[in-house]
Image: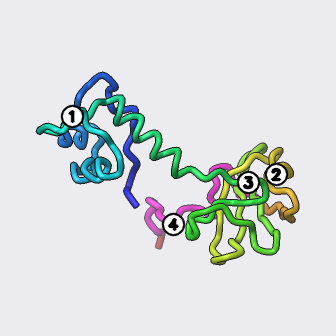
């Protein structure tokens, strides 16, 4: 999986790009642009150098991004191991409040038994997780979220 996705907003829609220029613009390797061409990115014409219209590149990247999205239905969380929305095992979900109105939700995947995470508002718990037993756990006790003080101390030891 790549370190970051190519941002279609970095491509100017009225410019024409070669594969090298497009790769430099998006911060990727030019072989990635060649792979996109095999997957359906259309060049301006069949001549060399191969040129891509900026508007075509932007539309291609946006369609690739939307085709990968999988919205979670109510009662499901996205499992990173299975790469699809899954129901929590035994219908149990832990909610840890981070602020007064939002927090983190954790559950175990019923298929692969890995921990799934989701950030959610407290007011949306009933609507997003119907039929699940939500257990509200204790949030962090200190203001900055650290339970204990830092072990990296600049003070010298006495004695």
Mark found first going from the N terminus, 3 or 1: 1
The alpha-carbon separation of the residues under discs 3 and 2 comes to 13 Å
- The mark lying in front, picked from 1 and 2, is 1
Q: Relative to the observer, which residue lies in front, 145 or 33? A: 33
Quadrant where the image shows the N terminus: bottom left
Question: Is the C-beta separation of discs 1 and 2 under 8 Å?
Answer: no
The alpha-carbon separation of the residues under discs 4 and 3 comes to 43 Å
Most distant residue in the left direction: 48
Q: Residue at x 11, y 39 (%)?
A: 48
- The mark lying in front, picked from 1 and 4, is 1
Q: Secondary structure at mark 2?
A: helix
Mark found first going from the N terminus, 2 or 4: 2
Disc 4 designates what residue?
151
The alpha-carbon separation of the residues under discs 1 and 2 comes to 52 Å
Disc 1 designates what residue?
45
Q: Residue at x 67, y 76 (%)?
A: 111
Disc 3 designates what residue?
73
- Find residue 30 and report its horizontal and vertical position in percent: 21, 49
> Does the segment drawn in magenta span residue 87?
no
- Find residue 9 and report its horizontal and vertical position in percent: 40, 32
Q: Secondary structure at mark 1?
A: loop
Q: Residue at x 23, y 28 (%)?
A: 16
Mark found first going from the N terminus, 4 or 3: 3
Mark found first going from the N terminus, 1 or 2: 1
Q: Secondary structure at mark 3?
A: loop
Seen in the picture, residue 14 relative to 22 is either above or below; the reply is above
Disc 2 designates what residue?
125
The alpha-carbon separation of the residues under discs 2 and 4 comes to 36 Å
Crowding at mark 3 (Cα within 10 Å: few <14, some 14-19, many 20+): few
């Amino acid at each position: 999986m790549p370190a970051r996705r190519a941002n279609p907003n970095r491509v100017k829609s009225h410019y024409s790009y070669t594969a090298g220029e497009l790769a430099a613009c998006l911060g990727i390797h030019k072989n990635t642009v060649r792979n996109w061409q095999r997957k359906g990115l259309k060049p301006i014409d069949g001549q060399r150098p191969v040129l891509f219209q900026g508007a075509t590149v932007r539309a291609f990247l946006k369609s690739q991004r939307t085709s990968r999205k999988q919205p979670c239905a109510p009662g499901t969380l996205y499992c990173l191991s299975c790469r699809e929305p899954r129901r929590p095992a035994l219908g149990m979900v832990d909610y840890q409040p981070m602020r007064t109105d939002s927090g983190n939700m954790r559950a175990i995947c019923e298929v692969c038994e890995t921990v799934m995470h989701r950030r959610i508002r407290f007011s949306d718990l009933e609507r997003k997780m119907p039929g699940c037993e939500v257990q509200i756990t204790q949030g962090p006790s200190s203001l900055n979220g650290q339970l204990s003080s830092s072990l990296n101390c600049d003070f010298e030891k006495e004695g």
